[in-house]
């Protein structure tokens, strides 16, 4: 609701409790920051876990021709 559509008596009878309350009254669902942040943290944890597993795997031996195997 914009300020021009409000009435003083309406505000007294049904006061607004902030932006989230006004969004609920209009039928919108307010953003749930806690849930969104926990999803982002879990996604970062998955990425870090995958990156850590990649670094923990032993690296394959570099390719060397048979005739150069004894050369350091």
Image (spheres, rainbow, N blue to C red):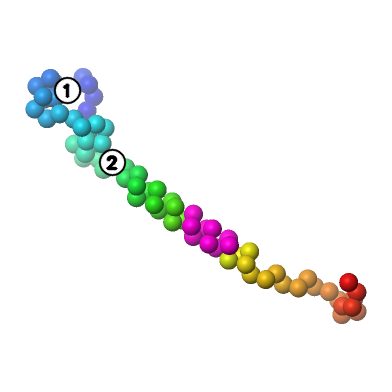
The image's mark for residue 31 is none
| Secondary structure category for the residue under label 1 | loop
- Spatial distance from mark 1 to mark 2, Cα to Cα? 21 Å
Image: 35 above or below 11 = below
Principal SS element in the magenta part? helix
Front-lying residue, 57 or 62: 57
| Residues drawn in magenta | 44-52
Q: Is residue 51 magenta?
A: yes
Crowding at mark 2 (Cα within 10 Å: few <14, some 14-19, many 20+):
few
Front-lying residue, 17 or 29: 17
The image's mark for residue 6 is 1
Q: Please state, as top left, top right, bottom left or bottom right, where the C terminus lies in the image.
A: bottom right
Kindly tell me whether residue 20 is visible in this rendering.
yes
Image: 17 above or below 71 = above
Left or right? Give the position of 34 relative to 57. left
Residue 39, image x and y in percent? Answer: 40, 53
The residue under the point 52% across, 58% down is 47
* For marks 1 and 2 on the same chain, the one whose residue lies earlier in the sequence: 1
Q: Which residue is mark 2?
A: 30
The residue under the point 39% across, 52% down is 38
């Amino acid at each position: 609701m914009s300020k021009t559509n409000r009435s003083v008596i309406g505000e007294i009878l049904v006061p607004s409790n902030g932006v989230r309350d006004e969004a609920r009254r209009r039928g919108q669902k307010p953003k749930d920051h806690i849930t969104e942040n926990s999803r982002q943290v879990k996604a970062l944890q998955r990425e870090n876990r995958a990156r850590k597993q990649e670094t923990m795997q032993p690296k394959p031996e570099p390719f060397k021709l048979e005739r150069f195997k004894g050369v350091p």
